[in-house]
Image: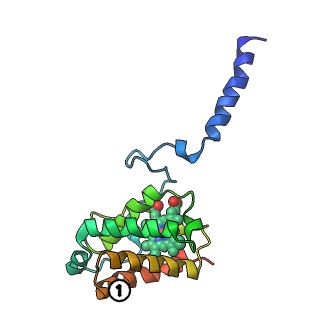
Amino acid sequence: MNRIALLAPAAALMAAALIAAPAAFADPSPDHPGEQTVDPYKASNANADATPRGDPALFAAFHGKDGVSRIVDDLIDRSVADPRISEIFKNQDLVRLRRTLKEQICYLMDGGEGYSGRDMKSSHKDMGIQDADFNALVEDLQHAMDKEHVPFRDQNKLLAMLAPMHRDIVTK
Ligand code: HEM
């Protein structure tokens, strides 16, 4: 057997190993270490799927960027541990979700630099999210906002911006 014939099976094995590499070995996003790469898409604030309220008092009621960050972290921790919806969060890129959800909420409250994530329809496609899942997540969000001592009327202003997204997120 010549040298090429000997090397060919090894090359095939290496190629197979690369193709079968688990997500943990996927190239991290160059801009955001720790995140998995996603299919290319056009980044735009329009992907946030709601119009900012133009109400600076609202961002203050959420305690600015730090408050939104605490709320999103708490919401994701609660959702992951919530037996009603925990299954949906398994094997998902929660590093990216934390970053983009914080961006989205800050943007909607006129408190961020902009939203760089995908639109709600493509972010949630194929997840089979139902009405009850949506309501469970909203409940977890309410607990997270309570913990941050966001006044009830301000909580409702955020929820009013998120509610119309139901039509793009709930697919069942
Ligand atoms: C109005 C409500 C919601 C908003 C504003 C929202 C927002 C987002 C955002 C910004 C992303 C990331 C987009 C990107 O990767 O570019 C995302 C992904 C995700 N969302 Fe939602 N979401 C909502 C409702 C829900 C519900 C009800 C569930 C399940 C119960 C859910 C589960 C997920 C999961 C698991 C991902 C990660 C997908 C992945 O890693 O590819 N979301 N969502």
State how many labels appear.
1
As shown in the figure, which amino acid type bears the numbered disc 1?
Answer: Asn
Point 65% across, 35% down: residue: 17
- The residue that disc 1 covers is 156
Residue at screen point 53% across, 45% down: 24
Direction bottom: furthest residue:
153
Describe residue 156's horizontal placement relative to residue 8 as left or right.
Answer: left
**Residue placed furthest toward the right:** 1
Residue 119 in view in this figure: no
Q: Quadrant of the N terminus?
A: top right
* Residue drawn at x 59%, y 44% as measured from the top left: 22
Left or right, residue 129 beside residue 98: right
Q: Is residue 140 visible?
A: yes
| Residue 85: % across, % down | 56, 72
Q: In percent of the image, x 69 and y 24: which residue is there?
A: 10
Neighbor class of circle 1 (other Cα within 10 Å; few <14, some 14-19, many 20+) is few
Looking at the image, residue 91 lies above or below residue 14: below
Q: Position of residue 93 (x, y in %)?
A: 49, 56
